[in-house]
Amino acid sequence: MIIYTYSIYILSALYGALILYFYLGWKALKEFNSKSPDTIPGVRVSVIVPVRNEADHIIDLLDDLAAQQYPHSLMEVIIVDDFSDDKTADLVRGYTKLQVRLIHLADYMDPSLPRQAHKKIAIETAVQLAKGDWIITTDADCRMGPDWVSTTMQYAKESDVVFVAGPVGLFYDTSFLGKFQTLDFISLVGIAAASIHNGFYNLCNGANLAYAKAAFLEVDGYANAKHTPSGDDMMLMHKIGKRFPGKVGFLKNRQAIVRTFTAPDFSTFWQQRLRWTSKAGHYEDKRITVILAMAYLCNLTLAFNVMAGAFHPQFLHLAMWQFLLKIGVDTLFAYSVARFFRTEQLLWNILPMQILHIIYIIAIAPASLIGGFEWKGRRYS
């Protein structure tokens, strides 16, 4: 029991140190002050959006892109249709507020390739056809402000980077599941920002990415990374960061936030998170795997100690110590990130959300290893 107790102390201390590492990295990352449109660099930009059955969202996205305060003569929009069977392609073809280039993946993709490669092949195809020197990617169900492109390009120029990870937020959802998703999601964004600032490229989001086309081609795009349906973002960031040390940055600026929607129900949320978690075993940087394993063990041992506490008080004392440490450092970090997204009110729900988060972490990891998931109407094993 003594060895177990000290093991829990060490494990918990490591977890606390890790969250403090993220907290300090986030605090050290200064907000980027974007300037007036007159200072926009004259760089050609290609905005690439892979889509599949997005008829409900595509017009809103195109309206946001048409409203960008970036010279339209320097910006092209490429929509890559991934075998949609709704009216997505028709809506894109009929759009008149902005010149949009529609590409059908079926015209370029080898039908023998596995379907988990579709999104990566869609982006690779568009990059090859793009006229821009910089590529910006987002998703069809996203919304952004009019200064999104200009702020991103100003940051890229002033920071002298070749890869920019941008902030992604969720539209406010008053349901408990919506609040849980939002708090969990912005914490992931904070971890991504802090890690990138500290030179550790472990997380980013494909809904808000920008990179030099030359850098993408230099690392051969998604070569050796097409075996998973997810990972079009962080696997690429890791490759570029390895090839161009110190040339990856996180854009901490509210005008650069891209927002998307919470999953409407638990089933959709679960399928989404299974897809995200499924790439955990494919990271080239094994430090990420070690961190994920440590976080999982912290949650697993905490739950075990609570249950074992029904038979022996010492286990319950350990669980209480673990939980107080966890909720303390997690709240400190979450609050600092929530202030940036102006969602501090979510912290009033931190106690029940922490309990739910522990259960969620314990369940999602094994589920992602033993089962498949659904995404965009497709089933993946």
Image (cartoon, rainbow, N blue to C red):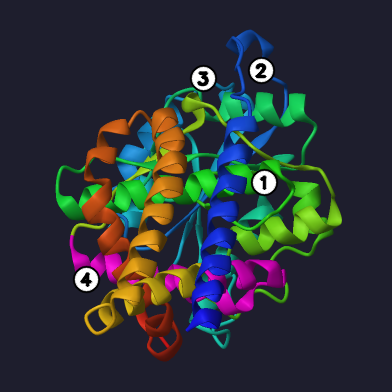
Q: Nearer the viewer, mark 2 or mark 1?
A: 1
Give the residue type that dot 1 points to: Ile
Direction from residue 245 to residue 286 in the image, left or right: left
In-front residue for pair 215/273: 273
Q: Residue at x 74, y 48 (%)?
A: 199
Tag 3 near tag 2, CB within 8 Å: yes
The residue that label 3 is drawn on is 69
User: What is the count of numbered marks?
Assistant: 4
Give the residue type that dot 3 points to: Gln
Q: Residue at x 28, y 75 (%)?
A: 313
The residue that label 2 is drawn on is 40
Checking the image for residue 196, the label placed there is 1
Q: Earlier in the sequence, mark 3 or mark 2?
A: 2
Give the residue type that dot 2 points to: Ile
Q: CA distance from mark 1 to mark 4?
A: 32 Å
Checking the image for residue 267, the label placed there is 4
